[in-house]
Image (cartoon, grey):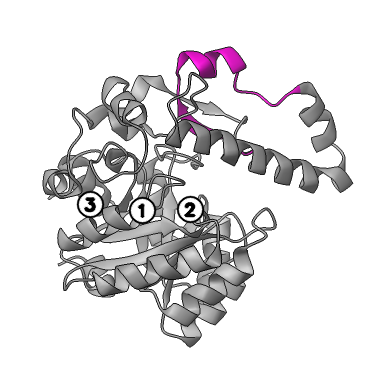
Amino acid sequence: MSDLTKILNIKHPIIMAPMFLVSNTKMVIEGMKSGVAGCIPALNYRTLEELREAIKELKENKVEGGSFGFNLIVNKSNVKYKSQLEVLCEEGVDFIITSLGSPAETIKEAHKVGIKVFCDVTDLKFAQKVTSLKADALIAVNNEAGGHRGNSSPKELIEELVANCDIPVISAGGVGNKSQLDEMLSYGAIGVSVGSPFIASEESGVTQDYKEACVKYGADDIIMTKRISGTPCTVINTPYVQKIGTEETWIEKILNKNRKLKKWVKMIRFSMGMKATEKAAKKATYKTVWVAGPSIEYTKSIQSVDEIVKGFV
């Protein structure tokens, strides 16, 4: 039995990764029934009341062998962060995954009410900071992850973190089938966080076009763009992405060099990028920016969450 199965009381060492505008309660409920953990970005909910309702729905449908959590963006670009954390702690969730900022406050508040905190890290330096803050586990985001990814290979990152940090390591990125899952565990990870293979699930709330793109395109079609959030992000190389390019505009580059303005430029770009991604995910439009990782290489058809989980285990 993997340690992750013990930590989260799940049957299989898999977290269905939080994906902006893709993850929803239906997916997580089916994931829990299949014996894995599911996680949803708190930013998928426009209001705190919607977030509260989602937590209640997940609690009502939780089954033995399943677990659920939420992802928090913990930097200044997310003005809702503190109020979202408050709701998660008030309502009670199994775990929180933190991204893009210091998890200090989240760890402190979540631990008061018995919620576990896993933190996204891309290098040893940040992993050691997170370890010193008493996080419950590290999410090692490697260079094969979808969305905002790291720079190190799965093997390099997992082995470095396992050797130098005394908290468990969960691998994120590069898992599209069972053999790749087993590979991550062989490097010392206690489990995996898997996102892109679930985009084309029947329960996913995105458009049929987005799901079919994950079936049609493969690993060679994934490229990096700075046009969504200002931070490099992986997307499917559609004709529209080719048309708009992947670099920041000249004015963004100039503004980003100004220390006082840089933070505001990032916040504006983040907001604009999220709106563009939402439009592509929720509406059929020729202006499509679809976020995905190279593990869509193994997505051959649109399946239920249960069938996808069975393929991994």
Q: Amino acid at mark 3?
A: Ser
The amino acid at mark 1 is Asn
In the rendered image, residue 165, in percent from the top left (x then y), is placed at 45, 66
Q: Is residue 236 magenta?
A: yes
Q: Are marks 2 and 1 in contact (CB under 8 Å)?
A: yes
Structural distance between the alpha carbons of marks 3 and 1: 31 Å
Mark nearest the camera among 3 and 1 is: 1
Identify the residue at image location x=60%, y=61%. 74
Q: Which residue is mark 3?
A: 186
Q: Earlier in the sequence, mark 3 or mark 1?
A: 1
Report the mark closest to the observer, 2 or 3.
Answer: 2
Q: Is residue 119 above or below residue 110?
A: above
Indicate the position of residue 258 as horizontal and vertical percent values.
Answer: 87, 39
User: SS at mark 1?
Assistant: loop
Residue hosting label 2: 44
Q: What residue type is disc 2 on? A: Asn
Q: Is residue 309 left or right of residue 247?
A: left
Magenta span covers which residues?
Answer: 229-249
Please tell me which residue lies in front, 130 or 9: 9
Is residue 102 a member of the stretch shown in magenta?
no
Instruction: Report crowding for label 3: few under 14, some 14 to 19, many 20 or more residues within 10 A (C-alpha).
Output: few
Residue found at x 61% / y 71%: 83
**Between marks 2 and 3, how big is the CA–CA gap?**
34 Å
